[in-house]
Amino acid sequence: MKFYEKYPVLKQKGFLSKVLVDTVYSTMNLENQNVSKIKIIKIVDTILKERELNGSAFFNK
């Protein structure tokens, strides 16, 4: 069984974005790296959009 077959919810762009933002933000806070959550959201959105444009995205539409 492939990873995305086991966890199909990760194919939903909104869910994946939220998980990535929360994970990065909490990890950086634990390491005392103060970065605003808004900046992380922008970075994650940019990366996901680039992946979509390059055709390497796997999201359900």
Image: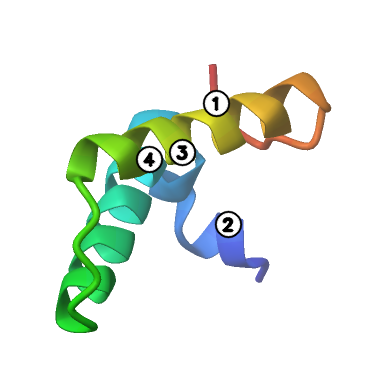
Badge 3 vs badge 4, beta-carbon distance below 8 Å: no
Tag 4 residue: 17
Disc 4, SS: helix
What numbered label is drawn on residue 5?
2
Kind of residue sitting beneath label 4: Ser
The mark lying in front, picked from 2 and 4, is 4
Q: Is residue 3 left or right of 19 when viewed as pictured?
A: right
Nearer to me, 13 or 41: 41
Q: Which residue is mark 3?
A: 43
- The residue lying at 40 percent from left, 44 percent from top is 16
Counting residues from the N terminus, which is met first, the one under dot 2 or under dot 4?
Answer: 2
Give residue 17's position: percent from left, percent from top. 37, 40
Mark 1 and mark 2 lie on one chain; the one further toward the N terminus is 2
Q: What is the CA distance from the residue labelled 4 to the residue labelled 1? A: 13 Å
Upstream in the sequence, badge 3 or badge 2? 2
Q: Nearer the viewer, residue 61 or 20?
A: 20
Amino acid type shown at disc 2: Glu
Amino acid, disc 1: Asn
Q: Give the image quarter of residue 12.
A: top left
